[in-house]
Image: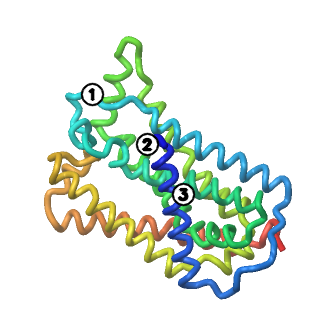
Amino acid sequence: MGSWELLAARGCAGNAGCGAVVLGLTAEQPFGGTINVPLPVLLLQLAMAFVACFVFFMHTQTLPPKQEDAVFNASKYLGRWLFLTRHCLAFQASHMLLSVLASLCQSTHLARLTDGLTLVMGMLGCFVTVQYFMLVHSHPSFQEKSQTCAKWNPPYKFKEVMIFTHSFALPLALLDVCVAKDRVRLAQDCSVIATALLALFYVVFYVMFITINRWATGEWPYAFMDDLQTLRKWAVFIAAQTGILYAFGLVLFGLMQLPPIWTSS
């Protein structure tokens, strides 16, 4: 099995495992019954899975950094798996695949596992899109690199590639909650508490992950992190990012409360 397939398999396994944790903590209804997904919704799920997997694949094909780039040293051990975007896109792609698989197989067990992860996957998807445009896209170092790549022969459309790989995560997250899932079932299988704990765990994990990599390579994965010179700045940064994730979660939870478009029972 190649490295790409192995990492994708790990993403699917991790996705299912987290879903089991969420559902095991909070599910009130026993497994059982069948699910009947309307054909238009099934086709939408297939399209979403295709888009999520294609975006993830395109992210794996982005041009590697040059040796003189700071990110070259930062990613010399982990490659692009150092970056938050790669994690979230892999999680989202595996989530979409498992969701459509549950519908195709009419598997209540798998459907409830993926339902249990819908909120946290949606939070990460929203985070990827919004934080990229807020923190990275307008940063001077990013703009400088985009201009440099545009002058290569042949030119490389770095900015356009980054926009493409970061733009789909948020709309996919919204479609997943609003249309592609049975919101009656989501209300049973999603837990706000378990979702909040998983989101907090991921934030802490990722900060530790990049800190260890910083110790090993001397570089942060994102240029703006060079400005975080004090413990107070890091605490504010972590609290702000966690708060943003929770804000996305509250918005998605609110959308879950809307009247259902369809039901699977």
The front one of 263 and 35 is: 35
**Mark 1–mark 2 contact, CB under 8 Å?**
no
The front one of 210 and 112 is: 112
Q: CA distance from mark 1 to mark 2?
A: 22 Å
Mark 3 residue type: Cys
- Dot 1 falls on a residue whose secondary structure is loop
Mark 2 residue type: Ser
**Residue at label 3?**
12
**Residue at label 2?**
3
**x%, y% of residue 254?**
62, 72
**Residue at label 1?**
66
Q: Left or right: 257 with respect to 10? A: right
Mark 1 residue type: Lys
Tell me if residue 39 comes above or below residue 27 in the rendering.
above
**x%, y% of residue 64?**
35, 31
Using the image, tell me which numbered label, if any, was put on residue 151: none
Tell me if residue 131 comes above or below residue 145 in the rendering.
below
